[in-house]
Image (cartoon, grey):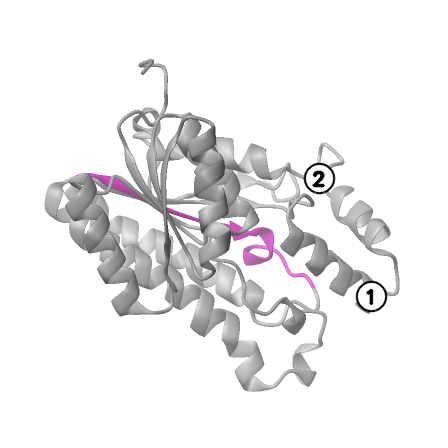
Amino acid sequence: MSTNLLLEDKNAVIYGAGGAIGHAVARTFAREGARVFLAGRTASRVETVAEEIAAGGGAAEATQVDALDETAVAEHLDAVIEKAGGVDISFNAVGLRNTTLQGVPLVDLEVEDFMRPITEHVRANFLTARLAGRHMTAKGSGVIMTVTSIPSRIANPLMGGVAVAMAAEEALIRDLSVEFAPHGVRVAGVRTQGMPDSGTIEEVFGIHAKAHGVTREQFQHMVAERTHRKRLPTLQEMAEVVAFIASDRASGIAGTIANMSLGAIPD
């Protein structure tokens, strides 16, 4: 392989690999020389991603894993470590399980519905990061990453518990980093504006458009207008940033969240 590859000889586990974000990241990691281990709730979806990567000459294996099941995550990670000799990158792309909880005023939400993104999405990130962190800190190297969204930093109406979950995950990134970094493990995130080529974002935009009494296209235009480039980022743009941060060339990046809001949030 060419030494110009960002992730040559790296072993990467990607949770939620059957979704749009996981798919884009898995494909990009493989292109950059990583051996990718794809985990997801729906076997057929992660197997399709693995087949696509293999057809392009990459190395990929797919396994059905529910990221909320601690035992399943631990057993899968142990199997990867035994087979590959270790894990260098753990990337969590697990999506929200119920997007319909958005578009509802907070005063009309049941407590359980408000808490669901927190109890599920944050839990999945904690479980996968904690288990990967145990292995990585023991060997003295590794990178743990996830993706958040801009409601973690700005107030948008009708977000339900999603914004709170995103903010919690960014706090988790910082807390994991301050504990893991002295052991050679970097923890970081990427915060994006909505990526319209993701099916989930298309659905979410539709929900918010209906709540605001506009079309999905009009709502997307409204969101894009808040950015400096008057457009939204793409899945591939996100994946390229993730691949760089996961690489050894980004060794100075830890405990922070890369801003991919295209200027919607000034840092």
Q: Measured from the top left, where is residue 163 in percent x and y?
A: 57, 63
For residue 50, above or below residue 28: below
Quarter of the picture containing the N terminus is: top left
Q: Specify whether 81 is left or right of 212.
A: left
Nearest to N terminus: mark 2 or mark 1? 1
Q: Residue at x 36, y 20 (%)?
A: 5
User: From which residue to which does the magenta span run?
Assistant: 141-156
Q: Is residue 76 magenta-colored?
A: no
* Residue picked out by circle 1: 210
Q: Specify whether 159 is left or right of 175.
A: right
Under tag 2, what secondary structure?
loop
Residue contact at pointers 2 and 1, CB within 8 angstroms:
no
Q: Which residue is drawn at 45% across and 70% down?
A: 120
Q: Measured from the top left, where is residue 42 in percent x and y?
A: 47, 60
For residue 205, above or below residue 193: below
Q: Is residue 154 magenta-colored?
A: yes
Give the Cα distance between marks 2 and 1.
22 Å
Q: Is residue 267 visible?
A: no
Q: Can residue 68 be seen in this view?
A: yes
* Residue picked out by circle 2: 227
For residue 231, above or below residue 177: above
Q: Measured from the top left, where is residue 190 in percent x and y?
A: 48, 43
Which amino acid type is shown beneath numbered disc 1?
Lys
Q: Is residue 125 or residue 52 the one in the foreground?
A: 52
Q: Residue furthest left?
A: 138
Q: Which residue is drawn at 45% across and 48% down?
A: 47
Which amino acid type is shown beneath numbered disc 2?
Thr
Quarter of the picture containing the C terminus is: top right
Q: How crowded is mark 1: few (under 14 residues within 10 Å), some or many (20 or more)?
A: some
